[in-house]
Image (tube, helix red, strand yellow):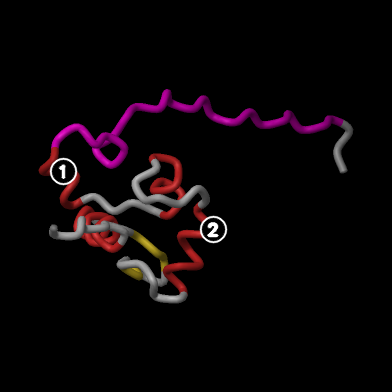
Amino acid sequence: MTAMATRKRRAPAKAPKTPNSRTSTGSSAEAEFRRWTPDEVAALKLLGFESARTIREKCYRRELFHHRDGGRITFTAEDLRRNNELGAVQPLSA
């Protein structure tokens, strides 16, 4: 060992976060190609479930329309539409 201690390295300064196209849902054309995770679906309340865990469990039991991209559960706009139709109640015709 040397008599002099080495200097501690400083972490490089992080660049400020800028919004990207994946986080913005401004245009409907982009939303058609966007994939939502169960956490995002629960946070945005796109389905009628409170927690992401409930959404995942229903996907594991194949009760909700979803995609398994690389083993991860994701939802497209079409999946969300189809899931919302599952809970729709039609009025009785008189």
Q: Distance between the residues labelled 1 and 2?
A: 27 Å
Numbered circle sitting on residue 52? none
Q: Position of residue 52 (x, y in %)?
A: 50, 53
Q: In the orientation shown, which residue stands out farthest toward the left?
A: 29
Magenta segment range?
4-27
Tag on residue 30? 1
Asked whether 51 or 48 is in front, the reply is 48
Callout 2: SS: helix
Above/below status of 8 relative to 46: above
Q: Is residue 64 left or right of residue 54?
A: left
Q: Where is residue 69 in the image (x, y as percent from the top left)?
A: 33, 68
Q: Quadrant for the N terminus, please.
A: top right
Mark 2 residue type: Arg
* Residue 11 or residue 21, whichever sits in front: 21
User: How packed is label 2: few (under 14 Cα within 10 Å), some, or many (20 or more)?
Assistant: few
Estimate how packed mark 1 is, as few (under 14), some (14 to 19) or many (20 or more) residues with alpha carbons within 10 Å.
few
Residue at x 18% of width, y 52% of height:
33
Task: Point out residue 79 in the picture as x, y percentages from the top left corner.
Answer: 25, 60
Residue highlighted by disc 2: 53
Residue in the foreground of this view, choosing between 86 and 91: 91
Q: In which quarter of the image is the C terminus?
A: bottom left
The three-letter code of the residue at mark 1 reads: Glu
Q: Residue at x 35, y 67 (%)?
A: 64
Q: Residue furthest front?
A: 94
| Disc 1 element | helix
Figure check: 10 above or below 87: above
Q: Residue at x 54, y 58 (%)?
A: 53
